[in-house]
Image (cartoon, helix red, strand yellow):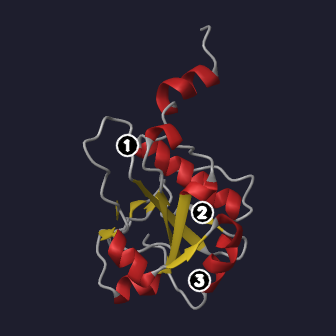
Amino acid sequence: MPATVGDFWRFALGDLRMNNARGYLAEFLVAQALGLGNVRRVKWDAYDLLLDDGVRIEVKSSAYLQAWEQRQLSRIGFSGLRGTRYHPRHGYDPAGKQFNAHVYVFCVQTATVHGEYRPLDVTQWDFHVTSKSALEEAGVGQSITLPTVLRIATRSDAAHLRDVVAAAAAGQNVNDEPWW
């Protein structure tokens, strides 16, 4: 076939304002900010990123702009906070959906004008970091709105993200027990 990987990328992920592409991009930007340069995304993992010290990180993204024409800017919110752990040989954890990461990083792409949208410009991203226990104490379920994120999370820029993540991870525990 005369196609290249670049051709596929342009076909499938050519507009980084698409929700799935923006989510992948946010995970990539957080990984880069944390110094995880040689990490690959694993779709079925119970969390998105793993630091050398075992800290599990879940990355969520939202944006004011979408790939389609909009009458107004999108409302910022994040979903899919709880997940069911999966093992390729043993299936899904019967305990069901739970918080599986020590730290949650909520990424907001802040551009509000399509012509000014620059997806790799980290100054156009706000990073909000919170712990698993802060989500639980706030009574957060499967989704969270920006006002709640602003109330319980610490805002960070990309340059300081690793320190903010480390602070949020202190004292956090996640369920590591096998279910099989």
Q: Position of residue 96 (x, y in %)?
A: 31, 69
Expressed as whole percent of the image width and height from the top left, the position of residue 142 reads 30, 68
Asked which secondary structure carries label 2, the reply is strand
The mark that comes first in sequence, 3 or 1, is 1
* Residue shown at the point (62%, 68%) measured from the top left: 157
**Secondary element at image label 1:** loop
Q: Which mark's residue is nearer the viewer, 2 or 1?
A: 1
Q: How many marks?
A: 3
Q: Are marks 3 and 1 in contact (CB under 8 Å)?
A: no
Residue 107: give x, y in percent of width and height. Answer: 49, 62
Q: Work out whether 18 lies above or below 32.
A: above
Residue labelled with disc 1: 66
Q: Amino acid at mark 3?
A: Ala
Q: What residue appears at the point 45 percent right and 39 percent down from the top-left corner?
A: 114
Which numbered disc, 2 or 1, marks the residue that appears first in the sequence?
2
Residue of label 2: 49
Mark 1 crowd level (few <14, some 14–19, many ≥20, 10 Å Cα): some
Could you give the CA–CA distance between mark 2 and mark 1, rounded to whole angstroms?
25 Å
Find numbered disc 3 in the image and state the secondary structure of the residue it sits on. helix
Q: Nearer the viewer, mark 3 or mark 1?
A: 1
Residue that lies at the very extreme toward the top in this rendered image: 2
Query: Considering only vertical position in the picture, is 59 above or below 172?
Result: above
Using the numbered discs, state the Cα–Cα distance from disc 3 to disc 1 in whole angstroms: 32 Å
- Residue 169 image label: 3
